[in-house]
Amino acid sequence: MSIPIPEFSHTPYRIKKRKFSEANVQEFLHLLNQVTWQEVYVESDVNAKFSTFMDSFPIKTVHMRDTIKNNWITQGIKIPSKRMQLLDSQRKTTVMKKKDLEYIEQYRKIYRRVIQETKRRKNNNYISSSKNKSKAA
C-alpha cells in the first residue's frame, strides 16, 4: 500500500498586491490628483463606482515563491552574519596583515559556534514542547 505524500513546492506563483514604499505612496498621491472624480460620481451602481475607482490605481503582479522559515535565525545571528560578509569581502579585496586574518578566522569560528548552538537549542525546544517526543526527535 502506498500513501501519496505532498511534497513541499518551491514553484513560483503570482499574487496581486500593492507595495507601500515611499516612492509608491508619492506615485499614488500624484495619481490621486489626476483622477477624474466625475466618472465615479456619475455611476449609479456601487460596484461600478468601486470598479471605476480601482481601475485608476492598478495593482502590481508580484512573483512569489514558498520559502522555508528559519525561526532559529535571530538578530544575534543576522548582525554577525552581515559583519562576516563585510569581513570576507574586505579579505578578498585587500591585502591584510596576518593578525587581521587571524581575527577573521577567530570571528568565523565563534559565528559558526553560535549558529550551531542556536540550532541545537531550537531543536531541543521543539522536542521538549512536542506531545510525541520520540516522533519529534
Image (spheres, rainbow, N blue to C red):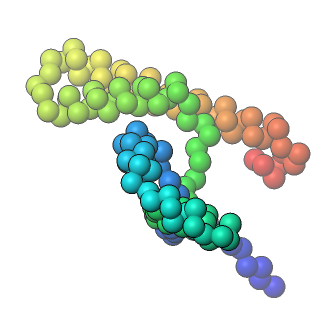
Q: Is residue 11 above or below residue 113?
A: below
Residue 115 x, y percent position in the rendering: 52, 32
Residue 45 x, y percent position in the rendering: 67, 71
Residue 62 visible: no
Residue shown at 67% from the left, 31% from the top: 121
Q: Quadrant of residue 70?
A: top right
Q: Quadrant of residue 1?
A: bottom right
Q: Quadrant of residue 44?
A: bottom right
Residue shown at 50% from the left, 58% from the top: 37
Residue shown at 60% from the left, 69% from the top: 43
**In this view of the protein, which residue sits in the foreground, 103 or 64?**
64
Residue 70 visible: yes
Q: Is residue 54 above or below residue 76?
A: below
Residue projecting furthest to the left:
95
Q: Is residue 100 above or below residue 39?
A: above
Residue projecting furthest to the bottom:
1
Left or right side of 36 for 117:
right
Left or right side of 134 for 77:
left
Residue 64 x, y percent position in the rendering: 50, 61
